[in-house]
Image (tube, rainbow, N blue to C red):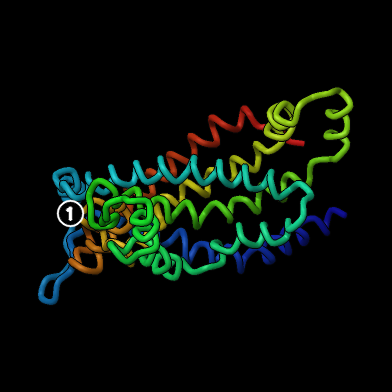
Amino acid sequence: MIHQQPRSWINAWLLLLPAMSLLALFTHWPAVATIVDSFFSTPKARRQSVFVGPDNYHQMLSDPVFWQALSNNFWFALGTIPTSIALALLMAVWVNDRFPGRTFVRMAFFTPTVLPMIAVANIWLFFYTPEIGLLEQVRSAFGGRTHNWLGSQETALAAVTVVAVWKEAGFFMIFYLAALQAIPPNLAEASTLEGASRWHFFRRVQFPLLMPTTLFVLVNAVINAFRMVDHIFVLTRGGPDNATTLLLFHIYMVGFSFWDTGYAAALTVVLLVSLAVLALLQYGVLERRIHYR
């Protein structure tokens, strides 16, 4: 037994080696390289990259587009995260019951999730098109005035937020539905015998048992709020006047349109640090309120 333990330890690490190698190569090393690049200038055709220290970060602090993108991302996250989670929970509770056509309703809720974001954006682009779009047709039928939803600074960000919520809610619903089906049915039977209302059963029994799923969904929703920019390319390209420019879209424009890779690396570091801090706060605050079975 003594001689078998080192061999088992070596076998375990050999089994983990392929996955760890891929993780280090495609996740950890790019993150470290990005941090290093953020302290260097962008190489040009006749000028090599040189160490510039915190100059890229100083440029960021004086960049009004960065602050606009950060503000847009804050409001975008504030609109998408609670709304998509609440809708997902509501839909999961509904389709968890037995009623005629339940399979069709589940499929309808989940369908937006399997569609590519570019296809989803094109569908909603048809809805938002001024004068001829479906939304405008409905508004005109009730006597409403035409409005350019994506071309107005007041409504553009809200319009793209609706698209993201429509896309994400069905995805989060699947996790809640799986968690609801894992709750023992005898809890519902006992609640019924005690005369508890459906709302009381949800608030006192189901929702506390769903907290581990809520934490998982919340972390994913926060990450998605900072990385979901596919529909921005199709719907607005960040306009009008940077009204829908999100942080990741700004990083893309700086890195691949303006070809300022050093500054783009500094922006990426800020994004990564922000996501890490948010994740730690979520785990630190919500972990104490979670009931694991």
**Place of residue 19 in the rendered image (x, y in percent of width and height, measured from the top left):** 60, 65
Viewer-nearest residue: 41 or 121: 121
In the rendered view, would you say 166 is above or below 216? below
Residue occupying the far bottom of the picture:
45
Type of residue at label 1? Asp
One can see residue 106 in this view: yes
The residue depicted at 78 percent of the width and 60 percent of the height is: 8
Position in image of residue 232 (x %, y %): 33, 61
Viewer can see residue 230: no
Residue 131: image quadrant is bottom left
Of residue 155 and residue 208, the one placed in the foreground of this image is: 155
Q: How many marks?
A: 1
Q: Quadrant of the C terminus?
A: top right
Residue for badge 1:
241
Residue 45: percent from left, percent from top: 13, 76
The residue at the point 37 percent across, 51 percent down is 142
Classify residue 228 by image quadrant: bottom left
Count residues near mark 1 (Cα–Cα under 10 Å), then give few for <14, some for 14-19, many for 20+. Answer: few
Relative to 287, residue 81 above or below: below
Q: Indicate whether 192 appears above or below 50.
A: above
Label 1 SS: loop
- Direction left: furthest residue: 46
Query: On the rendered structure, is 230 left or right of 255?
Result: right
Where is the N terminus found, in terms of image quarters? bottom right
Q: Position of residue 169 (x, y in %)?
A: 55, 51
Q: Residue at x 61, y 40 (%)?
A: 214
> In this rendering, would 166 be left or right of 60?
right
User: In the shown orientation, is residue 271 left or right of residue 290?
Assistant: left
